[in-house]
Image (spheres, rainbow, N blue to C red):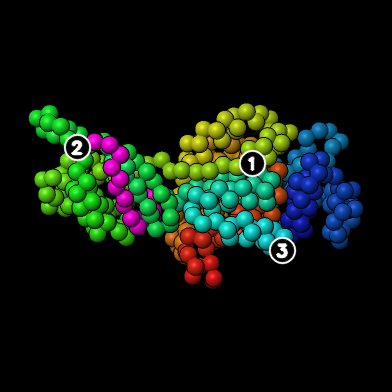
Amino acid sequence: MGDDRRLQVLSAIVTDYVRTREPVGSRALVERYRLGVSPATIRNDMAVLEDEGYIHQPHTSAGRVPTEKGYRRFVDEVARVKPLSAPEREAITALLSGAVDLDQVVVRTVRVLAQLTGQLAVVEYPSLRLTALRHVELVAMGPRRVLLVIITDTGRVEQRTVTIPRAPGGGETTVDPVALEALRTRLNAALAGRRAGEVLPVLTALAEQAPEAERLLLTAVSGELLDALRPDAEERLVVAGTANLARSTPDFSAIGPLLDAVEEQVVLLRLLADLGRAGGDESGMRVSIGSENREDALAEASVVTASYGPGTGQAVAHLGVIGPTRMDYPATMAAVRAVALYLSRFLAGPEGQDG
């Protein structure tokens, strides 16, 4: 479809259908859009677009509606990411600027994204596997239990309970506060600034050098730490705006499977991982439409995602929205990109937020 005018007609049909949810006829296009041609020419263009699979006629004598192929072409060739309005930018700034830690900013981010787009919003926490360790804390919780607190350079905090095994021979084992403090100091000196892939050899070296009093404790703590950082470890995410999705029921033949998929967060995590591997534009944005989503439950949905991270080329997680294919793509893409940028600036610290 090389005809620029037909692209204009397709754009007008998508825009009108997204706004009204009504099939679009040639008369409506003539009345609402300045296409500079006669109604007969528009009808001819619509016939070509229909033959090429970009639009279809749901009922006899009705107007046309975009197909999945039409939405794809609209996003690839026509849609432009429009700038956010001043009130929208102010809303993002007001909601995110007061956040003091990662948990707070993630919760606020997912809410503002759902509000701006009117869709279901999803924000993934920065991956433990892709960030660097900042600090490890060990807190005695009982005679044989220790709380392991993992803090990364993005501010993510992960807690694990470590149970110390009994000593060989069945002897009683208790957590020695002195040994615990010594191990905490040793771990932080060795692991601060290390990424997940660098942790195992460091822990192996520490185990070879560990005093007898720390070995059982080190083995138990190392096991939990490596489990938290393992390559297939399940990530964390936050969801908001499920009610927005429920209000889109007329756009789905059956919305139940999609709502079930949202509740079963592993489906969303797998979706974000797949989209992340597929890449996107220069800003890490990707739009996946209908059957392009590998999950059956999302076969009638569109997903707009972007990556975020503390610096250029340092994507540590993803965020995005899920809604019907009848979506305002330019506005949704603008909101997703802007929120990802604000979140990246938060992770970058004061320097990034000033930039």
Left or right for 210, reference 289: left
Residue at position x 89%, y 48% in the image: 27
Q: Position of residue 333 (x, y in %)?
A: 63, 54
Question: What residue is pinned by disc 2?
Answer: 174
Magenta segment = 128-143
Q: Residue at x 15, y 32 (%)?
A: 172
Between discs 3 and 1, the one toward the N terminus? 3
Looking at the image, do the residues carrying marks 1 and 2 touch, with CB atoms under 8 Å apart? no
Q: Is residue 320 visible?
A: no
Q: Is residue 129 above or below residue 166?
A: below
Mark 2, residues whose alpha carbon is within 10 Å: few (<14), some, or many (≥20)? Answer: some
Find the distance from the CA under tag 2 to the CA under tag 3. 60 Å
Q: Which amino acid does the dot numbered 1 rest on?
A: Gly
Residue nearer the viewer, 174 or 240:
174
What is the CA distance from the residue labelled 1 to the residue labelled 2? 47 Å
State the residue position of label 3: 86
Who's the residue at 50% across and 36% down the image? 265
* Residue at mark 1: 241
**Label located before the other in sequence (1 or 2):** 2
How many angstroms separate mark 3 from mark 1 (CA)?
23 Å
